[in-house]
Image: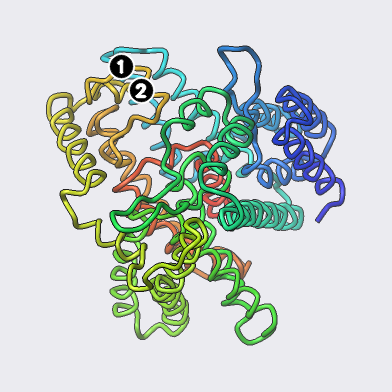
Amino acid sequence: MNPKNLTVLIFEIIFIFLMIFNIFPREAGLFITGLMIFYFIFSPIEDSLWVFIASIPLFVALPITENLDTLANWRILIIVLFLVLIKTITDKWKLKENLKHYQWEYLIGIFLLIAGLSLFPAVNIWIGIKKIIFLINAFLLYIIIRNLIDKKKEKERAIQKIISAIKVAIGLVLGIGFVQFFSVFFITLSNFWLFWDRHIINVFYGEFLSNLLLHSNTWFSYYASLPATLRMFSVFPDSHSFAFFCILSLPFFLTIIFLNSEKNKKKIIISYILLIFCLLAIIFSGSRGAWVSALGSLLIFLFIIFLYKSNKSCKKQMSLIIGCLIIFFLLFPIASRILLFSQQIQLDRPLDLENISLFERARSIIDFDEISVKSRLEIWRRTVNSIIIHPVLGVGIGNYPVVLNEKMSSAKKGSSAHSLYLDVAAEMGVFALIILLVVFWQILKRSWFIFQEKKEINNRFFQVWSGFFMLALVWILGYSLFDVVLFNDKILLFFIANLSLLYINR
């Protein structure tokens, strides 16, 4: 790990810490962004990329004006990084040539074209334009990583830096998440709510979201017979995004376990402990969509291992995936007792151990009278009706509130179909949904190809990691049936950083 990169990251963390405790004003975010821009301009691009990826959990909102205080600083940093890439490339046509190898890259272009066309029926064109700019902005990270280095030895070094940066980002998110989770053992939920909203959400996401979440959020689970419990959400504005991030983190833990299964037992034990913490984090997120999609993933990988039972290498890796999912479900009783202990501390009295909160929440998945399930089913019904009425270009990208007859200001409050696929079809039409599904299919095919084809990549890490990345893909694609968190900016950047690893070796 480059000491200069680490110094910049630590400096960023210190500044954020001082802003959170009001020692520095939020305007200090402008200073740290300027410092990072300076570093990006005068450093090797792979070093700048390391800092950018490691900083994904730490990106802050810039208080530029009173009405514009939600602009995340990564939006500026990624453009600077892209311009540095352009400057370092001697052959300016290289960018174009590097995007000629994979069908999904062309499909993304078609998807964005349909997004542009969907502006014609949009009620609010400006909101749609902002969403398109946001998607293009995030996709620049893929272009940067794909065009890093031509020489094989230098590329290997750059790839290792990307992997290192991703691991740092995972460590930051999980570390903050568990500090957050165990903090309610020492303070009341109301004090936690007020502090996290006014000090942390304010710094990371701006005044508007802070004011919104002060009155309504998804940070707690509520029960009929038990007190509320905190749902772990770390640096994200909601617990669903956090669960999504944790699922994407699993391949790295599983790869380390697989590659060290017969070499370093100490490393394996540590990796298993970290894996268990990551799985517990998904459980503590309280995201029922993540729990249900885990069950679907388990069934899919049981089917795969049945098909490829004669392939020893495939069978070993698929067995570890299935084992990971089984461990996930076995951790529920342990997690429930930890939550129960948290509830006892909040009430300052013992509770009946038979009233296990997580099982009560899990049972609510099939309770169609439960308010969350009932409202989601109603949203899905109205979304499907909208798709039937507007099948070609939808109601316009970013204009989902139209579907529910809400004001367009609801878009800023997170108005969505609570399903990525229904959301895309409602906003942009059925053709956009088909393109998106084909994109996901192409990514799955690519990860399977690397996993199976030894000639494609000599790097053993990639071959093993790609097999485990399929677990994450299958899981999050199932999860996306119930949520739209892929469009959270930090999640989308982290997903693109992971995805780029599949395509950096041509």
State the residue at coordinates (39%, 54%).
Answer: 227
- The span from disc 1 to disc 2 (Cα, nearest Å) is 6 Å
| Residue nearest the viewer, comparing 266 with 461 | 266
State the residue at coordinates (41%, 81%).
Answer: 315
Residue 298 sits above or below residue 98 on the image: below
Residue with the mark numbered 2: 410
State the residue at coordinates (53%, 63%).
Answer: 278
Q: Secondary structure at mark 1?
A: loop
What x and y, as percent, mark residue 308? Answer: 34, 79
Residue 83, image quadrant: top right
Q: Secondary structure at mark 2?
A: helix
Res 476 label = none
- Numbered label tally: 2
What x and y, as percent, mark residue 35? Answer: 81, 30
Q: Quadrant of the N terminus?
A: bottom right
Residue 493, image quadrant: top right
Residue with the mark numbered 1: 407
What x and y, as percent, mark residue 368? Answer: 16, 51
Can residue 506 be seen at all in this image of the molecule?
no
**Horizontal side of residue 194 vs 298, given as left or right:** right
Can residue 316 be seen at all in this image of the molecule?
yes
Whether tag 1 and tag 2 are in contact, CB under 8 A, the answer is: yes
**Horizontal side of residue 322 vs 64, given as left or right:** left
What x and y, as percent, mark residue 32? Answer: 77, 30
| Residue nearest the viewer, comparing 112 with 395 | 395
Residue 363, image quadrant: bottom left
Q: Amino acid at mark 1?
A: Lys
Residue 8 sits above or below residue 429 on the image: below
